[in-house]
Image: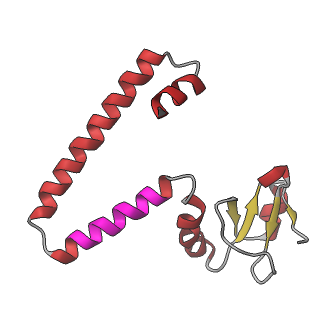
Amino acid sequence: MGLVVVTVAVPELSPRNFAMLYLILMAFAYLVGLVLLAVLRFSPDWMRALVTAVALYVIALLNPLTQAMASYPIHVARCGGLPILATNFAAAKSYSVPGSGNYSVSPLNDRAFCTEEAAKAAGYSRSNF
């Protein structure tokens, strides 16, 4: 079903070319998974747990529903503190600062900025809620 939806959503790519690309990508992912499982079978328990945790984190970063929440620690490290969270939800282009009542990480957060000046320069305005 997903293959049909994406084929219709991307009209510039012919359905046949998209299907071939999709099948090649899936076969590659399957083979990489088999190699990873073979290597981990003979690894110590802590190594398997570490690889599983990293793999789940990477999957969370690639999933649109969890990407904002999974990338939050990356923004905290990049900014050296809590970042300013911005959203385009309902075309509002607003941001919230740490310490405000509406500061929270959600799937709706599109971007993170280190300073208010950077958020304002990108066209966002401070949320009053």
Report the colour scheme.
secondary structure
Q: Position of residue 128 (x, y in %)?
A: 91, 71
Q: Residue at x 55, y 58 (%)?
A: 67
- In the rendered view, tell whether residue 33 sits above or below residue 15: below
Magenta residue check for 59: yes
Q: Position of residue 33 (x, y in %)?
A: 24, 49
User: Left or right: where does residue 129 sit relative to residue 40?
Assistant: right
Magenta residue check for 119: no
Along the line of sight, which residue is nearer the eye, 84 or 118? Answer: 84
User: Left or right: where does residue 45 sit relative to residue 80?
Assistant: left
Main SS category, magenta section: helix
Image quadrant where residue 75 sits? bottom right
Q: Residue at x 78, y 63 (%)?
A: 118
Figure disc tally: 0
Q: Residue furthest bottom?
A: 99
Q: Position of residue 50 (x, y in %)?
A: 28, 72
- In the rendered view, tell whether residue 99 sits above or below residue 88: below
Along the line of sight, which residue is nearer the eye, 47 or 108? Answer: 108
Image quadrant where residue 28 sits? top left
Q: Tell me where the magenta segment starts and ends, as one range.
A: 48-60
Q: Position of residue 83 (x, y in %)?
A: 68, 73
